[in-house]
Amino acid sequence: MSASSDNNEIEEGLNFQPKFDAAGLVTCVATDVATGEVLMVAHMNEEALRKTIASGEAWYYSRSRQSLWRKGETSGHVQRVVEMRTDCDQDAVWVRVEQTGAACHTGRRSCFYRKIEAGEGGARLSFVDDPKALYPK
Amino acid sequence: MSASSDNNEIEEGLNFQPKFDAAGLVTCVATDVATGEVLMVAHMNEEALRKTIASGEAWYYSRSRQSLWRKGETSGHVQRVVEMRTDCDQDAVWVRVEQTGAACHTGRRSCFYRKIEAGEGGARLSFVDDPKALYPK
């Protein structure tokens, strides 16, 4: 990883030079490699990126706890990274993972368990079919 | 949409109460409804959310241009929203879209056209099979 340089190099080059935000983070989207479903959106700092790339398991940075965490460290719900990509401006990362158990801390497979739909009094949510896992969080 | 209240209501309730960051934005992931591929990661402010929900076409907020934009407004590469979801803490949105043409401003279908892989001197990128679109950007 190296500091960001000019636009063409960032968009068309082969150096991974993540564009961290003011807090030192990039956004990471994790999808289920089998279904394509979006499991979660989280953040990685430089160390989380490095550990994820080196280990093949997803590490994140928790903004609320201000600490690095290996996904599934306490729950056992680890993410094995099958493929990792970055986007055109290198401020986001997409990991395709094999998810053990539930990605969501609520016990659901995906954090995205509610649909947003237009309603008469404004937008409303409804649950999609994503039952809570039977194993502990 | 309403202001965020307690945690249980946010995670288990049916009110859409997006948790905007300090800049008034939520993160939005757009995936191709046909392939599950992640097309782009962008941001929506309250107005972009409202217009997306009301119109069924994706609107975003550009942090660099500091302005609202309808995806495809100039390029014609619009996104028809088939389904829209929010996550457990309501600070991210996932839209499953029918993408006309290319989602990426480089002319590629997806912004995520490069893989990240461990290399001897650090992480390296390689292009995935995502040829530039033949139509203008």
Image: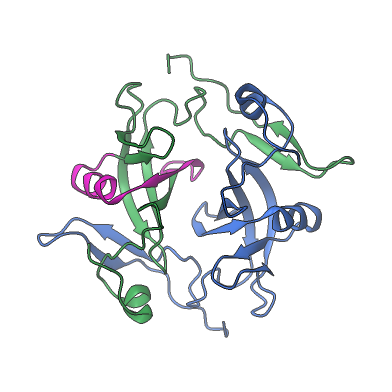
Chain colours: A blue, B green
Magenta residues (range): B31-57
In this view, the residue farthest toward the bottom is A136
On the image, the x and y values in percent for residue B51 come to 22, 44
Would residue B111 appear left or right of A67 to someone viewing this image?
left
Image quadrant of residue B57? Answer: top left
Report the residue at 36% width, 81% height from top. B8
Instruction: Say which of B83 and B7 sits in front.
Output: B7
The x and y percentages for residue B80 are 30, 38
Q: List x then y, in percent, for residue B67.
A: 32, 36
Q: What residue appears at the point 29 percent right and 26 percent down from the top-left corner?
A: B73
* Residue A11 picture quarter: top right
Specify whether residue B88 is painted magenta: no
Q: Is residue A10 above or below residue A81?
A: above
Q: Residue at x 68, y 47 (%)?
A: A83
| For residue A49, above or below residue A59 | above
Q: Quadrant of the C terminus of chain B?
A: top left
Report the label total. Answer: 0
Q: Position of residue B54 (x, y in %)?
A: 18, 47
Which residue is more in the foreground, B99 or B6? B6
User: Between A45 and B22, which is closer to the camera in this rendering?
Assistant: B22
Judged from this view, the residue extending furthest toward the left is A120
Indicate whether B131 appears above or below B81.
above
Image-based side of B119 in relation to A39, left or right? right
User: Is B40 a magenta residue?
Assistant: yes
Quadrant into which the N terminus of chain B falls: bottom left
Q: Is residue B89 above or below residue B101?
A: below
**Residue drawn at (28%, 45%) of the image:** B48
